[in-house]
Amino acid sequence: MAQVDMEGEKQQMLRKAVSDVSQEIEKYCKIEIDSARIPSSIDEDVKEVECKCCGLKEECTLAYISEVEECFCGEWLCGLCSAAVKERAGRDPKVSLQDALNFHRDFCFTYTTHRLNPKLYLTLSMRDIAKKSLEKRKSRLARSTSYP
């Protein structure tokens, strides 16, 4: 009987030890979760925006959105597009930020059209070829009909 009581006490002590450890783990996990949580005041200032060039969507704070829009003529750009526009504008002093933005937007449109809608891309390419051909004919015609 005494041996049975001893085993029962050992099991109780073991349960208590496991319970104490479980409580400590729960406290630690709760601290980790609480420290990783974003305050609700910041959550309210987050908005999803879409890049005007490539169409990438990101969640950003309103302050960051307005800062980027100030830099890029009132349009929001993702990090990759903003770097490309800055690089193009910085490479040639004759190129304005608006021109660099327009060039990059056109480039992104061409690339995404090619990837998402190959038929439309082919149509746009054929249009560009026809425009170039017409320009060449006009220039030849202008040179041949010009008088000295």
Image (cartoon, rainbow, N blue to C red):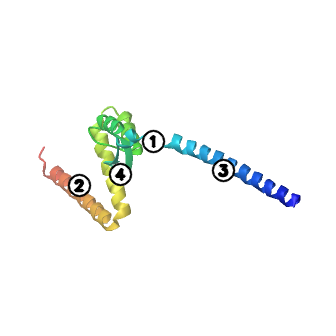
Nearer to us of marks 2 and 3 is: 3
Chain-order first, disc 2 or disc 3: 3
Q: Name the residue under label 4.
A: 54
Against 113, is 147 above or below? above
Q: Is mark 4 on a helix, strand or loop?
A: loop
Horizontal and vertical percent position of residue 49: 33, 47
Nearer to us of marks 1 and 3 is: 3
Circle number at residue 38? 1
Residues packed near mark 4 inside 10 Å, few (<14), some (14 to 19) or many (20 plus): some
Whether residue 20 sits left or right of residue 120 in the image: it is right
Residues packed near mark 3 inside 10 Å, few (<14), some (14 to 19) or many (20 plus): few
Locate residue 131: give its quadrant: bottom left
Q: What element carries label 3?
A: helix
Is residue 20 visible in the rendered image? The answer is yes
Residues packed near mark 1 inside 10 Å, few (<14), some (14 to 19) or many (20 plus): few
Horizontal and vertical percent position of residue 126: 28, 63
Going by the numbered disc 1, the residue's amino acid type is Ile
Circle number at residue 22? 3
